[in-house]
Amino acid sequence: MIELSHIYKTFEPGTVNESILFTDFNLSIHDDDFIAVIGSNGSGKTTMLNLLCGSLAPDKGQIIKDGQDITKMKEYRRSEFISRVYQDPSKGSCPSFSILENIALADNKGKPYNLGLGIKKDRLDYYRTLLETLKLGLENRIHDKVGSLSGGQRQALAMLTSTLTPTSLMILDEHTAALDPKTADNIMELTDRLVHEKKLTTLMVTHNLKFALQYGNRLIMMHQGKAIIDVSGEEKKDLPLSEILNKFNEISLEYGNSL
Ligand SMILES: Nc1ncnc2c1ncn2[C@@H]1O[C@H](COP(=O)(O)OP(=O)(O)OP(=O)(O)O)[C@@H](O)[C@H]1O
């Protein structure tokens, strides 16, 4: 379990641009959670992910993993057990490396490794088998540079590489937002399959309400640094789209704009 406990975060405190975002924010992510996070722009979704990954420190509060306080743990150390797939497909892989090199690098995350030593035949066969599961024909292109792949292909590869080694939390940061609708559907199906096959604890931020309702066991809606909806199980399954749209309308009305 990973917890954000009594988190406070203010940006640019004491200046005219001061922005108080989190005031005693709490979130417990359980091991069997696949959480879809939705919310208005500026509601704090990315900041929440950054706090979990360690790219941002809270002003007050703790981040706890399985009872251990990791608040002060550096981001690179947390990356050993937290993986993140970004909105921009170019962020999840190295374009000047081949597909094979990218997979080998991910496979050897945290281990002393030298690309010059080469990749053993049985490992190569294993990587090909993994690539076959993506059903994109990438297993026949293992020596192609990743920079030559489409956004959808790169995102599929990023999903594969980020789940190659055991991970305690997979963070999906609007990972389908830059893809066309059909490719986004395919990546979501792949995501769902990997989450279930590997029993991944997953936190997915999305602006796609269809995906948020269709996938995951839990749905959280953020607004102004608070979780204004947090439903799971049957309650999530029964949640009508109209209720979410009404909430968005209420939020929007606060700012003087109805949907
Ligand atoms: N580094 C920063 N400096 C100043 N303000 C920031 C910083 N990062 C975030 N904020 C502010 O915190 C608030 C929440 O931002 P955040 O990016 O977490 O929202 P979000 O829910 O991810 O939005 P979006 O859906 O637009 O991506 C916003 O008001 C934003 O301007």
Image (spheres, rainbow, N blue to C red):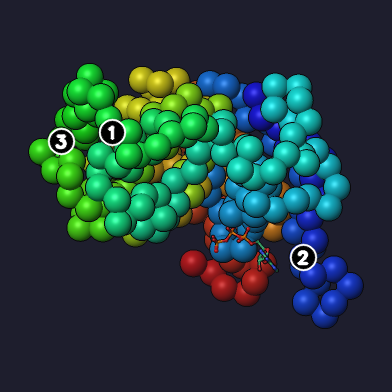
* Residue in the picture at 62% in, 37% down: 78
Q: Quadrant of residue 252?
A: bottom right
* Dot 1 and dot 3 residues touching (CB under 8 Å): no
Residue 14 horizontal/vertical position (percent): 89, 72
Amino acid type, label 2: Phe
Work out how far the residue at label 2 is from the one at label 3, CA to CA, in angstroms.
Answer: 46 Å
Residue 198 vs residue 55, the one in the foreground = 55
Q: Secondary structure at mark 3?
A: helix
Q: Position of residue 90 (x, y in %)?
A: 36, 57
Q: Residue at x 44, y 20 (%)?
A: 199
Which one is nearer the viewer's eye here, 91 or 26?
91
Residue holding disc 2: 11
Dot 1 corresponds to which residue? 118
Residue designated by label 3:
139
Question: CA–CA distance between discs 2 and 1?
Answer: 47 Å
Given residues 35 and 227, the one toward you in this image is: 35
> Along the polypeptide, which appears first: circle 1 or circle 3?
1
Q: Is residue 34 visible?
A: no
**Percent x, y of residue 87:** 42, 55
Nearest to the eye among marks 1 and 3: give it. 1
Judging from the image, what secondary structure is the residue with disc 1 in? loop
Q: Quadrant of residue 148?
A: bottom left
Which residue corresponds to the image point at 78% horizontal and 77% vertical from the top-left? 17
Marks 2, 1: nearer the viewer = 1
Q: Residue at x 29, y 51 (%)?
A: 97
Q: Is residue 111 above or below residue 87?
A: above
Mark 2 falls on what kind of element? strand
Gap between marks 1 and 3 measured at Cα: 18 Å
